Image: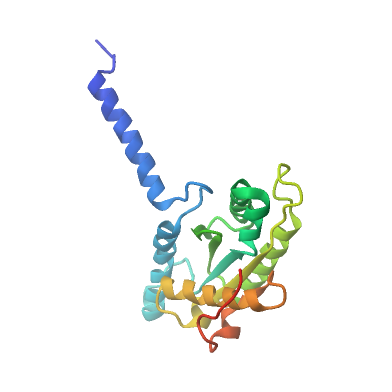
Amino acid sequence: MNNKTSPLEKVIKDLKREIKHLQKLVVKDELTGVLNRRGLAEEVGIFFDDIVYLRQHPQNRRSLNVDDISVLFIDVDDFKKINDKFGHDGGDAVLKFISLELQKKIRKIDIIGRWGGDEFVVALIGTDEESAYKKAEFIRKHLNSKKVSEKHRGLQVEVSIGVASFKNSKTKSIEELTNAADKAMYYAKLKGAKNCTIKYSEVANKPPRIPRNK
């Protein structure tokens, strides 16, 4: 029996491998390895839709009792200055560092993604706004206390974080919830010298967007 792979079979196998790779790229951020914006919206959207449905139909509640979800919107402070001083290699090091540290500090059920540029989103499943705020503050202080890399001496990271929860924000979709956390992050940029955390409930009645310097 001839077990040798034919040229056609090899081509098909290579194509399947390439398709799998491309499918991963659709939902994964190539630089950091975490979910990209699309992948994040899809995965968190499943939990969000579940929570909304169970709120409307409590009789169908399963053993997993998840009735809230919170989003942390994380933005690197002065990212442009980092790129100017340490080059894009330094900027990439910061993004990789943040993604790795976030993965270490969240639970397996939680979801992390790179929203775009120097922005990350973390979805804390089953977590209310107050608990999410405490987690965000822990993450902010942790990132600021760590050395980014041995290669880039003197490079440290400060972030501003906006926190929003489904219950407190009264949002109707994962997009609205993320936008609420984004709005809180914008106000965090204005508070003091940045490097702080703001809850959406504190700024819900303020204008949605305001001029700011990153």
Q: Which of 84 and 94 is in front in this view?
A: 84
Residue 138 relative to residue 52: left or right: right
Q: Residue at x 28, y 14 (%)?
A: 3
Quadrant that contains the C terminus = bottom right
Look at the picture and state if 86 lies above or below 157. Answer: above
Q: In which quarter of the image is residue 6?
A: top left
Residue 118 in percent (x, y) is at 56, 59
Residue 21 relative to residue 127: left or right: left
Which residue is at the far top? 1
Residue 57 in percent (x, y) is at 36, 78
Q: Which residue is drawn at 35% across and 46% down?
A: 23
Look at the picture and state if 56 lies above or below 82. Answer: below
Q: Residue at x 44, y 64 (%)?
A: 44
Quadrant that contains the N terminus = top left
Q: Can residue 98 be seen in this view?
A: yes
Q: Which residue is drawn at 63% across and 49% down?
A: 87
Look at the picture and state if 33 lies above or below 14. Answer: below
Residue 129 in percent (x, y) is at 58, 76
Residue 49 in percent (x, y) is at 38, 70
Q: Is residue 128 visible?
A: no
